[in-house]
Image (spheres, grey):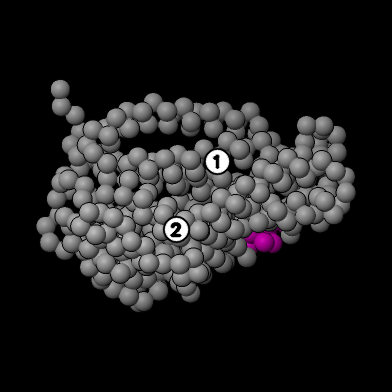
Amino acid sequence: MGIPLDYETLRMIWWVLLGTLLIGFALTDGYDLGVAALLPFVGKDDEERRLVINAVAPHWEGHQVWLILGGGAIFAAWPFVYAVSFSGFYLAMFLVLASLILRPVAFKYRSKKPDAGWRARWDWALFIGGFVPALVFGVAVGNVLAGAPFRLDSDLRVTYEGTLLGLFTPFTLLTGLLSVTMVVLHGAGWLAVKIEDGPVMERARRIGTWAAIGSIVLFAAGGLIVAKGGLGFRLDGLIDAAGPSNPRFSSAAAAPGAWLANYGAHPWMLVAPLLGLGGPAIALAGIRGRSSVLNLIGSALATVGIIATVGLSMFPFILPSSIDPRSSLTVWNASSSHLTLFVMLLVTVILLPIVLAYTSWVMSVLFGRVTIEDVRTNPDFY
């Protein structure tokens, strides 16, 4: 019996699923990272910081499953992309993992001693665990848009010619700061619906206001650089969307401004950048109008819009090469086999609804605001 879905369709499905997993990670663990980055600035004493910490304490561990699923999806569905990105960006990935490791350690050890200095140091460790991954993830996206410095030889062996410091250019630092403002805005939105009204909430609103403005300005600036700064790649020649996965079978070239071509060909894609600009504006309206729900909805829409804009702009590219565009990896030339994608899809159809149902159930069970009184009296709180 043959596979009921053709190769091209399966590749498209997995491209959509990969984007869904990345957006799922940004929507869930994104506000955890944002709250951690906000911690030293919205909490001025131990009780206030414990209030902030316990706003995410019940959820943060479960949210990391989205990062694992995203990495697993890249490994299984796009092995060429996994091989190039995880080896070429190894030091950057190590920096992210080292900072993420600080987070669980800080959560567990912070309240082990009543010493103010001890707790303050762990609070800054939580800040690092939120700020650094957000920054590096954004820098990585900027490098993907600009093209990574790698080439593939005739045997598909990878040569990566970049360095850790080389990842940090003016454009990629801009995308990194956009990522930080995006998660800080989302973290402020989460605090708006999760903690009691008071001084901490007011500080979160003030910082959230600047994060919303920063997201709009940085997103617009990034779009102008992409449009005017010569970023973009295009595929040349005939494209066989159902052909074998071999990057050497296709040809690509650098093409200034090509990242905007999809919007002309498919106007419906403009929804993504409109959300990227409109989401922060909605969040800002929620902050100014003291609507917690509107604040969080706006920050979530901003997250979806910004990430979707990158994926839709680059399609069908996943990881272009800046030094040898012919080695660029796309949806069509870098996937796993037809059978592998189909079997993985069957597994995903079973497991992904379970993950979504469990996440929704946990959110509903733990729904409600955290108060200073809870922090003072609940022995289970951090």
Residue occupying image coordinates x 81% and y 36%:
374
Name the image quarter holding the C terminus. top right
The amino acid type, in three-letter code, at marker 2 is Phe
Q: Residue furthest left?
A: 238
Relative vertical location of residue 202 with respect to residue 342 in this rendering, above or below: below
Secondary structure of residue under mark 2 = loop
Residue 28 appears left or right of 73:
right
Residue occupying image coordinates x 52% and y 37%:
65
Relative vertical location of residue 141 with respect to residue 224 in this rendering, above or below: above
Front position in the image: 194 or 57: 57
Residue occupying image coordinates x 49% and y 43%:
67
Q: Position of residue 5 (x, y in %)?
A: 20, 33
Relative vertical location of residue 10 with respect to residue 275 in this rendering, above or below: above
Residue occupying image coordinates x 77% and y 45%:
110
Camera-side mark, 1 or 2: 2
Instruction: Give the magenta range.
Output: 202-209
Where residue 286 sits, quadrant-wise, is: bottom right
Assess whether residue 72 is covered by the magenta stretch.
Answer: no
Q: Kindly check if marks 1 and 2 are in contact, taking CB atoms under 8 A apart as contact.
A: no
Instruction: Please say whether residue 115 is visible from this viewpoint.
Output: yes
Where is mark 1, residue-wise? 64
Q: Position of residue 17 (x, y in %)?
A: 36, 41
Name the image quarter holding the N terminus. top left
Labels 1 and 2: the sequence-earlier one: 1
Residue 89, which numbered label? 2
Q: Position of residue 10 (x, y in %)?
A: 25, 39
Q: Residue furthest top?
A: 1
Instruction: Please say whether residue 299 is visible from this viewpoint.
Output: no
Front position in the image: 122 or 226: 122
Q: Position of residue 372 (x, y in %)?
A: 82, 42
